[in-house]
Image: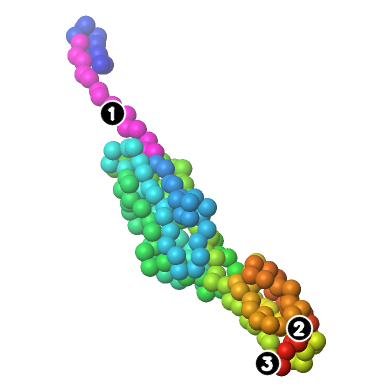
Amino acid sequence: MLQVTDAFGCTDSDQIDVTVNEVPTFTVTNNTNAGTGQICSGSIIDINLTSPTIGAIITLQPVVYGGFVTGGLYAAGGTFANGNTITEGGGLINTSNAPVSIVYTFSVATPDCTNPVTQQATIVVNPSPVLSITNSTPSICSGSAVNVLLNSATSGAVIRITSVNYGSVTGGTLSAGSTFTPGSSITESLINSGNTR
C-alpha cells in the first residue's frame, strides 16, 4: 500500500500487488539398463522426466548423435511434460567399432519463469561385436598343432568359446568359457589314436 500527501494535507493511496512465481524445478532420471546408461547397438533407452512445478515444460536442447549413431528421433526444441519418457523407440544403432556417447540436455520453464540450470543424461551406445576366425589348419596329421587365429575389430572385445567337441581326439585343453583377446591364436596339438577322421 502506498500513500501520497500534497502540500495541503490531502492524501490518496493505492495498492500494488506483486506475484512471485516459483522457479520451476525438474529431475532427469536415466533408467537405461538399470541406470548404467549403457546399451548395445539397436537397443532402446529409458530417460524419465519429472517436474513438481505446475505447468512446467521440459525442453530438449540440441542432441549430437554423431556420424556413427543412427536411429535418433529427437530434435532440439522438443518439449515434454511431467512423467514423459524418452525411449528412442526404434533403437540407437552404432555403426562404428567403438562405444559412442550421446548426451541429452534438458531445460525447464513455465510461462512465467525459466530455470537457468540444465540437466543431462548420457547414453553410451556400444557397437555390435564383430568376430573374425581364420583357420589355417582345417586338416592336420595326428600329433600336429592347429592354428586358428581369432580377431575382432570391436574395441574391448573378448572372444569366448561357447562349446568345443573333441570327440575321440585327445590333447585338447580348451573348454566352454575359455577366453581370448583379439589377435590370439588357438594352437594345441591333437592326437587321433583311432582309424577314423
Residue under the image location 71 percent in, 83 percent down: 169
Res 152 → quadrant: bottom right
Which numbered tag is attached to residue 190?
A: 2
Residue 197 marker: 3
The image position of residue 67, as x and y in percent, is 52, 72
Report the Cα–Cα distance between label 1 and label 3.
90 Å
Question: Which amino acid is tagged 3?
Answer: Arg
Please say if 123 is above or below 72.
Answer: above
Highlighted magenta segment, given as a residue range? 11-25
Q: Residue at x 45, y 51 (%)?
A: 31
Q: Which of the numbered marks, if any, corresponds to residue 82? A: none
Pointer 1 local density, CA inside 10 Å: few below 14, some 14–19, many at least 20:
few
Q: Quadrant of residue 176?
A: bottom right
Residue at 39 percent of width and 49 percent of height? 48
Q: Crowding at label 3, few (<14), some or many (≥20) Cα neighbours within 10 Å?
A: few
**Label 2 with label 1: CB-CB less than 8 Å:** no
Q: Is label 1 or label 3 in front?
A: 3
Quarter of the N terminus within the rendering: top left
Distance from Cα at disc 2 to Cα at disc 3? 12 Å
Question: In the depicted view, which residue is nearer to us: 94 or 169?
Answer: 169
The tag earlier along the polypeptide, 2 or 3, is: 2
Q: Callout 3: helix, strand or loop?
A: loop
**Residue at image location 24% in from the left, 11% down from the top:** 5
Does residue 95 appear in the picture of this structure?
yes
Q: Is residue 22 magenta?
A: yes
On the image, numbered disc 1 is attached to which residue?
19
Q: Is residue 179 left or right of residue 106?
A: right
The first of marks 1 and 3 along the sequence is 1
Give the percent coordinates (x, y) of residue 125: 52, 64
Residue type at mark 1?
Thr
In the image shown, does 67 or 31 lie closer to the viewer?
A: 31
